[in-house]
Image (spheres, rainbow, N blue to C red):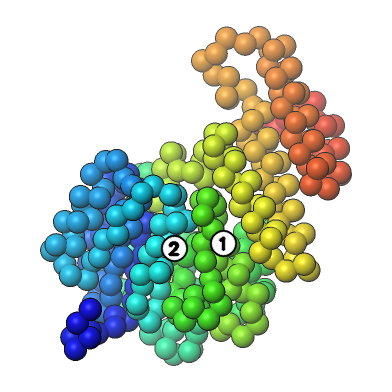
Amino acid sequence: MDTDNFRQPLFSIIIPVYNTEKYLRRCLDSVQAQTYKDFECILVDDGSTDCSGRICDEYAVKDNRFHVIHKENGGVATARQAGTDAAIGEYIIHADPDDWTEPEMLEQMYAKAKETDADVTICDFFYTNELGEDTLVNQKPYSFKPHDVLMEMFGRHRIHGALWNKLTKRSCYLDYNLSFYPGVNYCEDVLIWAQLFQNPNIKISYLPKAFYHYYQSETSITHSHSPKVIATMKKYFVKLEDTLPDTDKYIAKIESANFYFCLWQINVCTKNEFIGKKFTDKEIKHINRRKRDKIACVLLNHGFERMAKFILSLEKPKII
């Protein structure tokens, strides 16, 4: 590195990329359009098999603020870690390659961070559907104590656990040894907050504006309940319980139980999954009962006897 010409950027924007050629340019164009120009954008190509890696390289050639890391596929957690390790900005913020940002995001979030001397600055965001319709999601915490904010990420999930609407001092990652866990590619962002917000000295501020468009297609991991995705989710619940202090470990058990209950209620035990297949009503009832019993066993293993009994008492599951 030429230390004579070295200048630390104010922001490091980290974007893990894997097979998102359809949306990637929209995301990167929105980064380029930021009114605050003093940033580096670290693109981590996680072994993409489409044109995503080449698109990343194109932006790096055109704009020296963009840097590309090409790596073997290891999942989003290792991609975020690679970007975080390479970051040199004073602040870190993440983005996902199928989302996009409003031009004033960095400028206004930085102004709020400086005004409040915050370690973490939270803003609202837009949930954007496939029709391009925006829904504003308010993210104002009831309390600004770190532990209280962490608890708001669970239960009703009032505060989203994402990294992309939270501007964070890079020193937090260094001082508190924050890291992503390889193989935990579901809610890997929540685990960062589970590590950081155990520390009562973390200062949090809130900006009541939305800049980030959170786009979810029906193929998103959060809409999938394939065996592979479910296995990934299980890893998250285990790691969450390992990460939380003893006084909060019950939270991980509740999260796990809620997941299994919702999985059964929404996807596993409805006739919808049998559309197009030739099953009699009697066969469907038998399959549903078998799956219901399996979910109840999992809940019992997690110590949720009352919820397990409730599921077993439902002869006809609610279809929603």
Position of residue 88 measured from the top left corner of the image (x, y, whole percent): 34, 77
Q: Secondary structure at mark 2?
A: helix
> Which residue is tagged 1?
190
User: What is the residue that sits farthest to the front in this orientation?
Assistant: 1
Question: For residue 65, what is the image quadrant?
Answer: bottom left
Q: Which quadrant of the rendered structure holds the N terminus?
A: bottom left
Residue drawn at x 26%, y 61% as measured from the top left: 68
Mark 1 in CB contact with mark 2 (< 8 angstroms) = no
Position of residue 170 measured from the top left corner of the image (x, y, whole percent): 44, 78
The image's mark for residue 81 is 2
Residue drawn at x 20%, y 50% as measured from the top left: 54
What distance separates the C-alpha of mark 1 from that of mark 2? 14 Å
- 181 lies above or below 3: above
- 284 lies above or below 243: above
- Image depth: mark 1 or mark 2 in front: 2
Query: Would residue 135 be seen by someone viewing this image from the given angle?
Result: no
Q: Decide if residue 119 is on the left or right side of residue 199.
A: left
Q: Secondary structure at mark 1?
A: helix
Q: Amino acid at mark 2?
A: Gln
